[in-house]
Amino acid sequence: MPTALHRLPVEYLIRRSTLRPDGRRFDFYSFAAKPPRPAALDPEPQPEPAAGAVLEADLRELRWHPFFRTWNLVTGDRHLRPTMPDGCPFCPGGAEALSDFQLAAFDNRFPALVPDPPPPSEAAFPAARRPAAGRAEVIVYSPGHEGRFSTLAAEDVLRLLAVWADREREAFLDPAVSFVFPFENRGEDAGNTLSHPHGQLFAFPFLPPRVDEKLASLGAFRERHHDCLFCALGRMEESGPRQLYNGQYVNVYVPDFARFPFETHVTLRAHGQGSLQLPEASAREFAACLLAVSQALDSLFDQPMPGMMCLYPAPRPADGDWHLHAEFLPLMRTAGRLKRLAAVESGLGAVVVDEAPEQMAASLRRVFPPLPWPEVTVRRPPE
Ligand SMILES: [Zn+2]
Ligand SMILES: [Zn+2]
C-alpha cells in the first residue's frame, strides 16, 4: 500500500536559470526540504548572448507538407550532430559544462525549434514556410552517467515529473506555443547516441498531426456518444485482458489498438486533468506507473528495450476531454528482433501488428513489478 501522503517528507523544487554566451538557456534543478527564498528563483547575473549566435548558424524553419497538411521541422545542421562524442557532454567536465544540479534542462545545441528563429526562406506557391519558433530542450535526469530511466529511483521520476511540469508552465508563457512534448528516445535503435540518462522536450508552435488527430477524435466521439473517449477507453480496459495496473488515479494498459510491440499507455483517470502540473497524490502514482512500465519493458527480454516514451499533456487551446497520458512505443518484437517501419507503415501509415495486444499484455503482466512508490512528495515553492 502507498504511504499516506501527509507522512511523506516534502521537497521543494528549486530552479537556477542561466543564459550562456551562445544564447542558450540552462535551468539547473535541485530539491530541498525548505522552500527557497524568492530571490533564489531569480536568474543569476548573466552575460548578454551574442546576437543570433546559434540561431543563424544554419537553416531552421517550418515547411508545409501539402498532402499531410502539417509542418516539417527543417534544419540544416542537425546531420552534423556528433554521433558518438569522445566524452559524455552531460557528465561533469563534459562539453555542456553542467554543474551543481540534480536535474538540468537546457536548449539543445542542435535545436529543431528556437525561441527567436531567423526569418524563413522564400517559397513559391504551393510551398509554404514559417519561422521555427518554439523550444527544443534536453533534460538530463541525473549528474551520474550510469543507468537509464528504468533504473532511476521512484523519487527521481517524481522529481523529473516536477521538472516537466515546470517546463510546461514555462513554455506556455510564450503565447505562440500550442503543445509541449516531453519524450525520450531509448537506445541506438531509436536514434539515441548518448547513454547518459536524459530525455528531450519540444514546445511546438502548431499542433503536431497526432495531437491534432486526437483532438478531432475526442470531439467526434463527444458529439456522437456524449462521452469522453479517454474515460470510455479507461472503463473498457480497467477490467479487461489488456490491463496491467488499475489504480486510484492512473490506468495502465496495452490498448486494443496497439501498433507497436508491447505498446503500453499510462493514462490519468481524472476527467479534465490534462496538465503535467498534477495534484500530489496523482503525481506520485503517475510517476510510479511510468517507472513500473519501463522496468517491465526492460525485463521482458533481459535487456534495455529500445523505443520511445512520449508524454501528451493537453495542448492549447485545451479540450476538456483531454487526459494527461504517456505512450511507451517499444521497437523490439522478440529478443534481438526489431520492428521495422517498412513499406506499409512508412509508405501508407497503415500498420501490420505482429502479435495480439492481449498476448502482449499477458507477457508484460508476467514481469510487471509491484508499483515502485516514491517515498517523498515534491512541491513547487509558494510564489
Ligand atoms: Zn555522462
Ligand atoms: Zn474523460
Image (cartoon, rainbow, N blue to C red):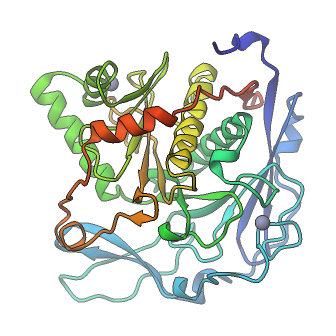
Camera-nearest residue between 25 and 353:
353
Tell me the quarter of the picture where residue 147 sits: bottom right
Image coordinates for residue 66, horizontal then vertical, percent: 19, 74
Camera-nearest residue between 342 and 136:
342
Q: Is residue 196 visible?
A: yes
Q: Quadrant of ligand 1?
A: bottom right
Give above or below for 113 relative to 213: below
Give above or below for 191 relative to 118: above
Image coordinates for residue 308, horizontal then vertical, percent: 47, 56
Camera-nearest residue between 243 and 26:
243
Say left or right for 145 vs 210. Answer: right
Instruction: Name the image quarter holding the N terminus.
Output: top right
Q: Residue at x 32, y 35 (%)?
A: 319
Q: Residue at x 57, y 28 (%)?
A: 278
Tell me the quarter of the picture where residue 356 sits: top left
Give above or below for 233 relative to 6: below
Q: Residue at x 13, y 29 (%)?
A: 223
Instruction: Name the image quarter holding the C terminus.
Output: top right
Say left or right for 106 vs 193. Answer: right
